[in-house]
Amino acid sequence: TVIQWFPGHMAKALRLVKEKLNLVDIVLELVDARLPESSRNPQLEQLLETKPHIMVLTKKDMADPNVTARWLRYYESKGIPAVAVDSQHGQLSAIEKKINVVLKDKLALRESKGIIQQRVKVMCIGIPNVGKSTLLNHLVNKNVAITGNRPGVTKAQQWLKAGKLMSLLDTPGILWPKFEDQEIGKRLALTGAIKDSLYAKDDIALYGLEHFKQTNPKALQEKYKLTDEQMQLSNVDLLLELTKKMGFKEDYDRASERIIFDIRQSKLGRYTLEIPQLGGE
Ligand code: G4P
C-alpha cells in the first residue's frame, strides 16, 4: 500500500489514531528493522508519551542481526521496550512476553481484583508497508480481511483475539513517514516505504550502491559479478557499467530499477541502513 499524504490526510490520520489510543491499554509501534528511526512517524513519540508502548522492529529477517541487536539495546536504554520480529511468522510469544513485562503492575492489579479474564487491548501503529497487516494476521492466526486500512475509510471497530493475552484492534493506525530529510527519504524509498516517484531512481540506486560498498562490498561484487577494478569505480561510473552489464544499453533508469528491486528483495543479502547514534547504547 502506498498512500499519497496530503496535509488533510495527515490531520485526519492523526485524529483517528488519537481517538483509538483511548480504547487501548498498549500500543505496538511498528518500525522497519532496516531503518528503525527513519521509519518512525515524526509525531508518534509525542503522541505516545502517556500510553505504554512497545517498539516492534519488523522484517528482522531482512536486517543485519547484529545491528538489530544494537537497536534493541539502544531503545531499551532509552526506556522504550523493544522487540524484533519477522511478521510473516508466529511472533505471538515474543510480543506477549514484552507485554507481560511492560504491563506487569497493571496485570498484577487486575489479578488481585480477580479480573484475570480481561484481555489486554492492543493496537498496532506504523507507516505504510512496515508490516502492520501481516503482523496482525499472524498474531490472530487467521487471515482476517483487514479493510478500512486507510485514512478516510471508516467502519465499525472490531477486536480480534490473539493468543490468551491480547485483544487486537482490527484496524491498524497508519501514520506518515518522515519526508523532510533527503537522507531519510532515500532510505525509505530504497526499502519501498515511500512512492518511488518522489525520488529520482538513479539517486536511490546510487544510494544503495554506496551503502553496500561501505558495509558489504563482497555481496555487491558477487551479485553483479564485478571485477576488483570495477569495484574501485565511482558510484556513477559503477551504475553506468552495471547498466551495460545488464544489457540495458544506456537506460540507466531501468538499471536503477533493477538494483533497487534486488536490494528490496534482499538479493544482496540482509542489510540495515542506519545504526544507532553513539551515546544511546
Ligand atoms: P502494512 O499493513 O503496514 O502496510 O504492511 P503489510 O503488512 O502489507 O506488509 C508490506 C510488505 O512487507 C508485504 O510485502 C509483506 O509481505 C512484507 N512484510 C511484512 N512483514 C514482514 C517481515 O517481517 N518480513 C518480511 N520479509 N516481509 C514482511 P509485499 O511485497 O508488499 O506483498 P506480498 O509480496 O507479501 O504480497
Image (cartoon, rainbow, N blue to C red):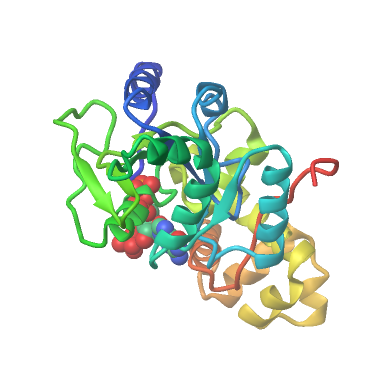
Which quadrant of the picture is home to ligand 1? bottom left
Dividing the picture into quarters, in which one does residue 252 lie?
Answer: bottom right
Q: Is residue 73 visible?
A: yes
Q: Please tell me whether residue 269 is drawn above or below residue 22 in the rendered image.
A: below
Q: Say which residue appears at 49% left-offset and 48% top-offset.
A: 100
Q: Please tell me whether residue 164 is drawn above or below residue 88 in the rendered image.
A: above
Dividing the picture into quarters, in which one does residue 273 lie?
Answer: bottom right
Q: Please tell me whether residue 260 is drawn above or below residue 148 in the rendered image.
A: below
Residue 122 is situated, as x and y percent measured from the top left of the image, at: 36, 40
Residue 15 is situated, as x and y percent measured from the top left of the image, at: 35, 18
Q: Is residue 177 left or right of residue 66?
A: left
Residue in front for this viewpoint, 192 or 52: 52
Q: Is residue 22 left or right of residue 83?
A: left
Q: How many marks?
A: 0
Dividing the picture into quarters, in which one does residue 137 lie?
Answer: bottom left
Residue extending farthest to the left is: 156
Residue in front for this viewpoint, 63 or 115: 115
Q: Please tell me whether residue 210 is drawn above or below residue 196 in the rendered image.
A: below
Residue 99 is situated, as x and y percent measured from the top left of the image, at: 48, 47
Residue 244 is situated, as x and y percent measured from the top left of the image, at: 59, 72
Q: Say which residue appears at 80% left-offset and 41% top-offset.
A: 280
Q: Say which residue appears at 54% left-offset and 75% top-offset.
A: 246
Q: Is residue 124 visible?
A: no
Q: Say which residue appears at 35% left-offset and 24% top-offset.
A: 13
Residue in front for this viewpoint, 52 or 145: 52
Residue in front for this viewpoint, 158 or 190: 158
